[in-house]
Amino acid sequence: MYHKTLFIKKYSGDLEKFSFNKLKKSLQNSGASDEEINSIIETITPQLYDGINSKEIYKKAFGILKKSNRICASKYSLKQAIYDLGPTGYPFERLIGALLKQKGYNTQVGVVLKGECVSHEIDVLAEKDDKVYAIECKFHMNAKTVSNVKVPLYINSRFIDIQKQWNNSEKTTYLKQGWLITNTRFTEDAINYGKCVDLTLLSWDYPKDNGISKNIDKFGLYPITTLTTITKREKKLLIEKDIILTQELIYASHKLKQMGFKDKKIKNIQSEAQRLCNVYPS
C-alpha cells in the first residue's frame, strides 16, 4: 500500500492531505465491493503525485469503476452530476421539489409571491399540514462557490417580507419558514446565522448525515446526468425537454423515441435507470 504523504488540490482550490480512507469511503458509499475498491486504489496509487487535483483522482476512479460496475459508477458520480445539471438553476430546483414531494410536501417550482414591500420569485414553494415553506435554491457549477453569511441574510429578509404579506392575508395556510438550499456548502457564519433566525439550511453534506447527497440516495432521485449510457449531448437534450430525474426515463419510452433515440438505446437507458433507482414498472 502507498504510504507517502501527498497533498491534493480540492475542488475549492485548497490544499489538503490526501486520505485513502476518504477515497475508500466514497467508493463504499457508491456500493462498490471491497474487491472493486482495492483494484481502483491499486491502479491509481502509482499515478498520484503531490498537488494532483481531486477532480483528476475522481476521474481516474470513476473510469475504472465504470468498466466493472456502471450502477456504482453512477452513484459515485453524483456530486459532479449535479454540477452538470447547469448552467441554469432550474433543473436543480426541480430536483429539490421532487425530494420534498418524497417527504410528503406539495410543491410548486418557480412561484412569484407578493411581499409587503415588493414581489419575489420563489424557487420552490412547499406545503405540508397547512404550513408553507418558501425555498431558495443556490445552484453552482463548481465547488469553489460557497454561500457565506450574506446569502442567508438576504434570503431571510426576502422571507420576512413575504411572510408578513402572506400571514396577514385571508389565506388558510400559514407561511412558517424560509429555507436556503445549495449544492455546494455554507460557511460557518452562514450556518450560525441560519440557526439564529430559524432559517433551514441544506447543502451537499449539511446537516450531517441528512444533506442532499444522503436524501438523493435514500429516495433514489438521481439526476439523469448520473447515467453512463447517455452522452453529454444527450443529457443536455433531455434537460432541454424537462426530463431531469432518472426515474422519469423509466416511463418515457415514447418520448425518447420521439427525440430520436433508437430502440436498443432506449432499452439500455431504461435498464440502467431501473437498476439505479431500484424501480421496475409492473
Image (cartoon, rainbow, N blue to C red):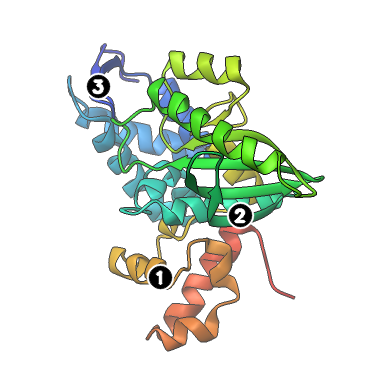
Alpha carbon distance from label 2 to label 1 = 17 Å
Which residue lies at the image location 53% right of the left edge and 62% below the top edge? 246
Along the viewing direction, whichever of 21 and 241 lies nearer the viewer: 241
Q: Is residue 178 left or right of residue 225?
A: right
Q: Is residue 85 left or right of residue 211?
A: left
Q: In this view, does 269 lie above or below 216?
A: below
Q: Can residue 251 be seen in this view?
A: yes
Q: Quadrant of residue 49?
A: top left
Q: In this view, does 148 lie to the left or right of 30?
A: left
Tell me which label, 2 or 1, sits earlier in the chain. 2
Question: Given the image, on which type of amino acid does mark 3 rest?
Answer: Ile
Along the viewing direction, whichever of 132 and 143 lies nearer the viewer: 132
Residue labelled with disc 2? 98
Q: Is residue 33 visible?
A: no
Residue labelled with disc 1? 238
**Residue 8, numbered label:** 3
In the rendered view of the protein, which quadrant contains the C terminus? bottom right
Alpha carbon distance from label 1 to label 3 = 35 Å
Number of numbered discs visible in the structure rendering: 3
Q: Which circle, 3 or 2, is nearer the viewer?
A: 2
Question: Given the image, on which type of amino acid does mark 2 rest?
Answer: Ala
Question: Given the image, on which type of amino acid does mark 1 rest?
Answer: Leu
Which residue lies at the image location 31% right of the left edge and 43% below the top edge? 141
